[in-house]
Amino acid sequence: MQATAATYLDDLNPEQRRAVEHGGAFATPGPPLLIIAGAGSGKTNTLAHRVAHLLVNGADPRRILLMTFSRRAASEMSRRVERIARKVLAGKAEAITAGLTWAGTFHGLGARMLREHAERIGLDPVFTIHDREDSADLMNLVRHERGLSSTQRRFPTKGTCLAIYSRCVNADMPLDEALVRHFPWCAEWAGELKGLFAAYVEAKQANAVLDYDDLLLYWAQMMADATIAQEIGDRFDHVLVDEYQDTNRLQSQILLGLKPNGAGLTVVGDDAQSIYAFRAATVRNILDFPDQFSPRADIVTLDRNYRSTQPILTAANGVIGLARERFTKNLWTDRTSSRKPQLVTISDEADQARYVVAQVLAKREEGIALKQQAVLFRTSSHSGPLEIELTRRNIPFVKFGGLKFLDAAHVKDVLACLRFVENPRDRIAGFRVLHLIPGIGPASAQRLLDAVSDSADPIARLCEQPAPARAGDDWTAFVRTLQQLRYTDWPADIERVRHWYQPHLERVHEDAEVRSADLLQLEQIASGYPSRERFLTELTLDPPDATSDQSGVPLLDEDYLILSTIHSAKGMEWNSVHVLNVVDGCMPSDLGAGTSAELEEERRLLYVAMTRAKDDLHLLVPQRFFVHGQPVRGDRHVYASRTRFIPEALVPLFERTSWPRVQPGRTVASQGPRIDLGARMRERWR
Ligand SMILES: Nc1ncnc2c1ncn2[C@@H]1O[C@H](COP(=O)(O)OP(=O)(O)OP(=O)(O)O)[C@@H](O)[C@H]1O
């Protein structure tokens, strides 16, 4: 039976429903709305209902702009919208939600807008997009050309230069201020950096490439033009933004440009989960949102948590309650439980891995599938010992947030080739490809690129070049492939590149077989995209996460444990969650404990990790860590202590245990200082 408008919203609580129905009549978009949503309070659910409600009431899906933090979130949102809409629209729901063509990330949608308006804003419409690594390579090239790599005093590395540049752009901050506030050790180079960035911008333009930051910067600049801004703004009746706490100044400028009076604008976020300040996200966006409009935006607060049990929530509230600045709500739930979250003391990382495996298997025995369980960590490398243990025990797992699939050299090689034929002015791509051919070194690669750069058809010109002296047959094969690729034939293009690349892969990499499998997988992914251009753009903007090398990719219907960095766990939930290394130095990370703002962000990270758990939460506190970078049999280690975010006063919110549990008859492990006699004995003879 079909639901009526009244019943399909019945599952929502009064605040959620207020957010969904805000604005009333849909022919005229309502006033701006800010939804402040605590962790697990049904933010995604509410936003999906709001979009479905708009559609059910006749809003045109093609006139809805829906911006999410990741592509995965966008497709998940569309699926949810369809499920909800189906209750009312039945068979028509699929066709209507298929019209939601403007759902995606800020960067992805930005790329589309820019390509559509390229001619009008002086951009080459075939522009390609550089990922961070390509951007760093180009920065390095420019840095080198300007003689900055050979200065006596050490000039900042390419990565640091790019970070400074990116900070200025995303925070819309003058260079001097960015240096003083975030990179004081580079302040002496202000003049050189300014020149470098100017040259970097010129190089990007000459190569017809945009980097990630440009997608937002160009979009924001484009919206500063009143005519274009109005044109683009008028295309959409409703603009909805998820995870607003993690947007930066440019993103808020873009929104204001789209909807200067806020009509039809909805943003959702949680300041307590703001964890991207290191990318210049600013929590001020969410705090200042209501007052940007006159009359002020309406605010709906969702503070009822549906995810976690009360003891988990109480502990998480305790952690965030100690935050220096706090703007929102205390979450509550009616999910009672007598089980507090566990705070588990463990001797070292190896035991930590064994503990997790034992617990995960025990849970599986209780009927909790592996997929319902997750292990979270601050930094990708923290899961190393656990990955080994899981592999040894044959437990399938998938890891999110580690090395990206696209960062692997062989995948980058294939993509560089496709990028080069798509945009022959992209020198970084061209250089990478030419460099693969035996007999072509850096100098001849540059020479070849120089020889064709002014041509109207650089690929044709390149094919006419005489074969470089030692390249022989490899050059012939390369030219043949280029000729095939000049006019795109998608997705056959990628297969052609793979065939051409195969002998180079076998020559360069010992594990060619494994890597070939990756390329086949890439080809499979490619077939899901309508064109070469869309494939390259979207893949660069939101690359799929790598799965573990060792375990291989589990089949999708297989059960597997989730391993994830906390950043990548955003928006997710699991029955049981283990958080690794809840110790000072890891959480807060040594890197993140500089300024107090950074420290606050680390605290929010722990909060995000804790609020992912529905029924079971284990925070693990290993006491000893091996020191990396010592001889193979070295056993130097350091002692760690429980994270400062759980001071003694909060400990009663947890159940404290240690593992392995002490056997009767064995001496109780001392909590006091430990002595490593073995190390002392070795020390004697050094
Ligand atoms: N009105 C409701 N009644 C029952 N369950 C609900 C309701 N709203 C949301 N939920 C459930 O609450 C859980 C959290 O919802 P959701 O994932 O939308 O939260 P969220 O606010 O996006 O969380 P976070 O910000 O922490 O990622 C989900 O399991 C969802 O099904």
Image: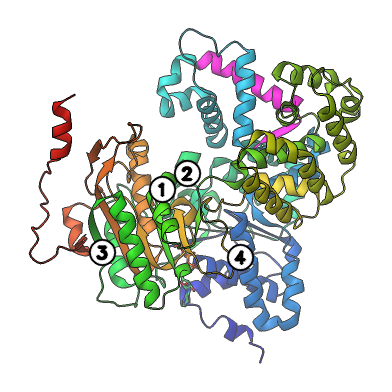
In terms of sequence position, does the residue under pointer 4 or pointer 2 come before the other? 4
- Residue contact between numbered discs 4 and 3, judged by CB atoms under 8 Å: no
In the displayed structure image, the side of residue 274 where residue 64 appears, left or right = right
In terms of sequence position, does the residue under pointer 2 or pointer 3 come before the other? 2
Residue 290 at least partly seen: no
Instruction: Specify the principal SS of the magenta part.
Output: helix
Q: Pointer 1: residues within 10 angstroms few (<14), some, or many (20+)?
A: few
Q: Residue flagged by tag 2: what amino acid is it? A: Thr
In terms of sequence position, does the residue under pointer 1 or pointer 2 come before the other? 2
Query: Dot 1: what SS?
Result: helix
Image: magenta residue range: 190-211
Q: What is the spatial separation of the Cα atoms under label 2 and label 3, in whole angstroms? A: 33 Å
Mark number displayed over residue 77: 4
From the viewer's side, name the closer residue of 597 and 633: 633
Q: Which residue is mark 2?
A: 282
Q: What is the spatial separation of the Cα atoms under label 1 and label 2, in whole angstroms? A: 32 Å
- Residue contact between numbered discs 4 and 2, judged by CB atoms under 8 Å: no
Q: Which residue is mark 3?
A: 342
Q: What is the spatial separation of the Cα atoms under label 1 and label 4, in whole angstroms? A: 32 Å
